[in-house]
Image (cartoon, rainbow, N blue to C red):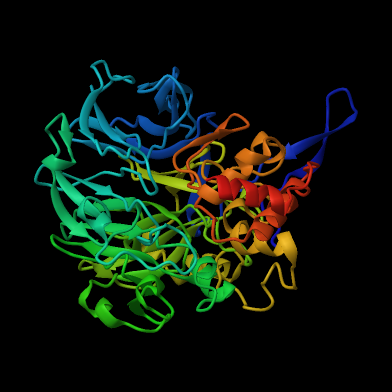
Amino acid sequence: MLVSPHFKKLIFCIAPVLFLVQCEQKPPNGGLFLPDGFKAVVVVDSIEERVRHMAVTNDGILYGKLRNSSEKGGIVALQDKNNDGRAEVIEKFGAYRTLQKWSYSTAMRIYNGYLYFSSELVIYRYKLKPGTLIPEGEMEIVMTDDHEHGKHEHIGKPIAFDNKGHMYVPFGAPSNACQNPKRTPGAPGMDPCPQLEDHGGVWRFDANKLGQTQKDGYKYASGIRSVVAMDWNSQDENLYIVMHGRDDLLRLFPNIYSGWDSALLPSEEFIRVTEGSNFGWPYCYYDQMLGKKVLAPEYGGDGNIIGRCQDFDDPIMGFPGHWAPNDLVFYDGDKLPKRYKNGAFIAFHGSTNRAPYPQSGYFVGFVPFKDGKPSGDWEVFADGFAGVDPIVSVKDAEYRPMGIAFGPDDSMYISDSVKGRIWKIVFEGDKNNFGRDQLAKMDKRKLLAHIRTPDETKDNLMAGKFTGGEKVYFTYCSTCHQQDGRGATGRFPPLNGTEWVIGDKERLINVILNGMDGSMEVNGEVYNGVMPQHSFLSDEEVADVLTYIRTNFGNDAGEIKTEEVKKLRNSL
């Protein structure tokens, strides 16, 4: 078991009045593990609305995009006035909504004197004025996702800019694998997939034009399922993305995939996106263990067949499944050791759906680059965010790395999405004598349960035979709501102590049978995950699993009978 620096270490202090009191010793580097020579300080311990992506101005002002916009604002500005690394000035501004509902931010970039940021459907910008903390002008709307369907899965709007005045924006796929009905065991994928016309790709826009919609953009690349991590590489002048791979291999095709397969696959693909490239979603996915792109089961694949996938573009690197790459930044400064020059830093937010194995990711990785291609394997750059190992449930993680930004002095900022903490990392070592010795302890962290490939037998957290509602839950529900029923912040709601579970039976049965799209509020928090329909379950299975949920996780509600499910299903 890893003893994390996040665990509180109590020491005895002698007070002036000569009695003993207990006090907390703060862990070094704000709890982070870093290569030798790097040091970290906590810029701000927490921000209520939580921070996702960030950008830093040339005069050192740090702007963070808040997950939720409220009457207080949708952006936080932080300033370190005495150069100790910590923010003395913290101000919020830029409210584009007065309520915290329905918000999902995925971008913060500075380009051509403007601060660009996004909600799930709109890209905004403010004109920056050097020496001014809060922009003085009006918020401008650059682009609006005006599809009639509104919000859907993979709705994030990260932003990247090239050196020719273009802005790149992905329009994520509105499904997992283009099934109809979606996320239904055994259901085939639509062929051809109609969603690819307006989704599942990257569009290019005029970065300086206001009031655009998707129709004003140019479809630059396709076959890309979901994007949060995206950056323009100024060295080789190309767009790069670390794509979120598809989910639910075990849940949807248990006759093909094991729980171990589903935990590790498919790859989170690191892709070099050029004009006209196509990476094969939904027809294919990349298997990093086989080193090839294979046909998806919705289109006749069995985990080995290549078929039409030979016609699609391959990634430059494949990371293990479900690590959730949520930011990508290429470093082009000169103050860090030479090995980091032009390399890629990636924030792996961490998995939610690796059950029955430990959750994985939750660190910041690094990929060295040379001549526009990876020049070595991926590395662990910053770790220790979660504070525990193994990570059984996503909510066991104390922090989760979300955003990365570099300041004008080459200091690196990392944001956390759980509490809104921000770290500042600086290099204080000898950059001319930095090599394998300084990276040795980081190499060892690859052996920890939240990073290494799990042992198929020994690391199975739910080994054993389950029956009835417990079996249904661990087969179809635990990958999202977690085996402890506590869910995942912002995505999948908890199942304990909520009226959605212990209240109206008919409403609960309806959610299982019909699913639910869009955002929902549970116990005062907004969740953006999508609940797929489970009408493929029998009346008895629905009754069993709902009874299990209503009588576990601290709940003490009445059972749901098979007859109740049957009656409601027949009335639909």
**Front residue of 246 and 423:** 246
Horizontal relation, residue 43 to residue 62: left or right: right
| Any part of residue 201 in sight | yes
Residue at the location (31% across, 43% down)?
157
Looking at the image, is 248 positioned above or below residue 455?
above
- In the picture, measured across the screen, residue 204 lies left or right of residue 495, that is left
Q: Quadrant of residue 445?
A: bottom right
Q: Nearer the viewer, residue 37 or 383?
A: 383
Determine the residue positioned at 62% across, 67% down.
357
Residue lying furthest left: 164
Residue 115, quarter of picture: top left
- Residue under the point 47% across and 37% down: 519
In the image: residue 465, left or right of residue 446:
right
Q: Is 283 in front, or is 76? A: 283
Say which quarter of the image contains residue 467: bottom right
Q: Position of residue 387 (x, y in %)?
A: 64, 52
Location of the N terminus by quadrant is bottom right
Task: State the image coordinates of residue 429 (x, y, percent, origin top left).
Answer: 45, 55
Q: How many marks?
A: 0
Can you see residue 29?
no
Question: Residue 91: x, y in percent?
Answer: 43, 20
Q: Position of residue 93 (x, y in %)?
A: 38, 20
